Image (cartoon, helix red, strand yellow):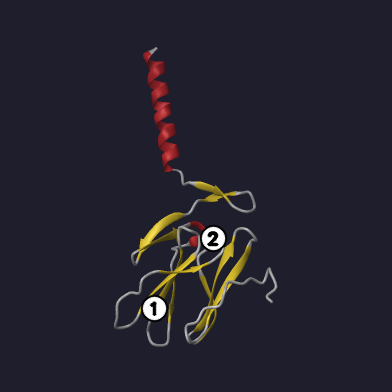
Amino acid sequence: MSTIKSAAVALAALTVVGLGASPALARDGADTMKPAPQTCNASGGTFYCGGDYGDGKTYVTLADGTKQLFVIGTDHNVWTTWTPPRGSQAPWMSLGGTKDFVTKVKIVNKKGDAFSVASRSAAINADYYRDRSAGGAWSGWWTYAVPRG
């Protein structure tokens, strides 16, 4: 009898260890299981990383040497901070979004200090974009999936 109890306890322990070692899973839009994102910390902020978020950080360097960092915050929106070459880091600022971004921020259409940030929306399974002018002004969010205008 004690051999059976010992085997049951050992099996239960292996089951718990096995479950604890496996990564968390979440359903994606295609109803398949993918690793759930983790949270990472850098530059005083908490953001998503892992899976489709990669390391979670996207940098762009402006003409004056300012480094700007973009992440997807735990509210699933885009957040940014920047550090000038001879200065301190700016406070984190939300660029908003659709509250359902599921990929790392991408920088696209970079021309000098003008560029667009993009991330995929889970709701429409398409990228949303926000444009930055060379002077630093930001547009609203838009997507090719929904015509502008």
Figure quadrant of residue 46 = bottom left
Q: On residue 99, which mark appears? A: 2
Q: On residue 26, which mark appears? A: none
Q: Who is closer to the viewer here, 4 or 109?
A: 109
Residue found 62% across the figure and 54% down from its top: 29
Provide residue 49's location: percent of width, then percent of height: 45, 59
The amino acid beneath tag 2 is Lys
Task: Judge left or right: residue 67 versus residue 35.
Answer: left
Quadrant of the drawing holding the C terminus: bottom right
Figure quadrant of residue 66 = bottom left
Residue found 32% across the figure and 83% down from its top: 85
Where 125 sits versus 86, above or below? above
Provide residue 6's location: percent of width, then percent of height: 37, 20
Q: On residue 67, which mark appears? A: 1
Provide residue 30's location: percent of width, then percent of height: 64, 52
Mark 1 and mark 2 lie on one chain; the one further toward the N terminus is: 1
Secondary element under disc 1, as helix, strand or loop, is strand
Task: Judge left or right: residue 4 versus residue 106.
Answer: left
Quadrant of the drawing holding the N terminus: top left
Q: Who is closer to the viewer here, 72 or 97?
A: 97
Compute the Cα span from label 1 to label 2.
25 Å
Provide residue 34's location: percent of width, then percent of height: 55, 51
Q: Who is closer to the viewer here, 80 or 103?
A: 80
